[in-house]
Amino acid sequence: MKIRVQKFGGTSVATLERRQRVVHHIQQAIEEGCGVVAVVSAMGRKGDPYATDTFLNWITENGQSLSPREQDLLLSCGEIISASTLSSLLNREGIPNTVLTGGQAGIITNDNYNNAQILTINPKRVQEELKQGKVVVLAGFQGQTVDGETTTLGRGGSDTTATALGVALNADVVDIFTDVEGVMTADPRIVEDAAPLESVTYTEICNLAFQGAKVIHPRAVELAMQTNVPIRVRSINRDHPGTLVSSTHEQHRVASEVNDRLITGITQMANVTQIKVPAGEGQYDLQLKVFKAMAENGISVDFININPSGVIYTVYDHVADQAETILRSMDLKPELLRGCAKVSLVGAGIAGVPGVMSEIAEALTREDIPVLQSADSHTTIWVLVPGEDMVKAVRSLHRKFDLHKAHLTS
Ligand code: ADP
Ligand code: MG
């Protein structure tokens, strides 16, 4: 039997009207002859009654902390409520189904509560239910330790549940349903004419996600990549298959499209601090000292640039004060620039293409946006800009590379 994993995010299950769309998509997969595993997130976003962030709010409002184990028990309820509610709608349509928690579905994690990693999946129970012709409605974002303790998987956890199940069940496709048409050339909340992409590679979407595009969690993509399970990112409101995410080599329907385009998408990350530490005369071990001190204090560093006159790197704004204190205690004289933003241009086609950086510089200069730092790899170019210029930078680069012209074929 062909198996289809479908993931429905928080907004997709938030209202009765959308949940009816969920039922529609499940029905379609059944009509295509698939056994269906429907992974659901908690209903809605912050402020909605049973959204994950609402539960977290209750705890903070109480001014009381909750131990990680108990917090996971609380958080896991959101997905169970959502899954059971969907089950009743499926019943109404006469679609046989079973609701399973992460633990019941055989998702075994370590005991890193609040951000647990999946160790193994024993899909026997899920396979049995599917064999009986039932839709498995699976509570996303959760698992169980070998000792039977409930755990949650951290941000983007339902994406991870879906692709992990996709791999374990050897699904034909993992569908990630959400509130946008697919993977877009930029965050549609920032760029009005951002366009949905026909296809992207695992590497491209991972890079976009790591650099701030939250459309799918990078950990989920990395899992799918292991066995080349194709992912489709698609809209709950449409029947269009959305954006196909796969490796270029074997699966790409439109491999030439992926290879021909220079820039696939642009993403951004705000609240970043740039730190410059000048080297003293003849001081050759500066980078070693600086990065060792950051590591020992659990401060993650990014955008590293080392040259004879010193080291430059970035940290998140919220640890900037801590980093500064550490550096000063080492008798160094750091210069900090808070509130910067990292803008990333991602594309499998940028490797070695001359002139891309000059086009970026041209677009930003025209808007009087200073480039504080830049770096590149074979798939990504990063530029650091002042935070207040972030939106303007993303928009002007989007225009410069004509990204609004990317589109889904209907
Ligand atoms: P879900 O609740 O379905 O998991 P998310 O909010 O996690 O939904 O992800 C979807 C959101 O991701 C979209 O509403 C969009 O604003 C945002 N997003 C950011 N960058 C992109 C991008 N490049 N393509 C598509 N969506 C993006
Ligand atoms: Mg999400």
Image (cartoon, rainbow, N blue to C red):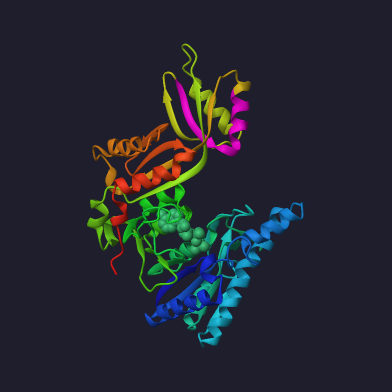
Q: Residue at x 55, y 77 (%)?
A: 16
Count how many numbered circles sit on residues in the image.
Answer: 0
Compared across the picture, whether 31 is left or right of 57 comes to left
Q: Is residue 95 above or below residue 172?
A: below
Q: Quadrant of the C terminus?
A: bottom left
User: Hey, which quadrant is residue 409 in on the image?
Assistant: bottom left
Residue extending furthest toward the front: 367
Which SS type dominates the magenta stretch?
helix
User: Hey, which quadrant is residue 360 in on the image?
Assistant: top left
Choose between 32 and 347: the one closer to the eye.
347
**Residue 100 x/y as whole percent:** 58, 73
Q: Residue at x 45, y 48 (%)?
A: 210
Does the segment drawn in magenta span residue 316? yes
In this rendering, does residue 223 appear at all? no
Choose between 58 and 399: the one closer to the eye.
399
User: Hey, which quadrant is residue 294 in on the image?
Assistant: top right
**Residue 217 x/y as whole percent:** 48, 55
Choose between 288 and 321: the one closer to the eye.
321
Compared across the picture, whether 251 is left or right of 370 comes to left
Residue numbers of the magenta segment: 310-327
In this rendering, does residue 387 appear at all? yes
Q: Residue at x 56, y 33 (%)?
A: 295
**Residue 94 x/y as whole percent:** 51, 88
Q: Quadrant of the N terminus?
A: bottom left
Q: Residue at x 32, y 41 (%)?
A: 378
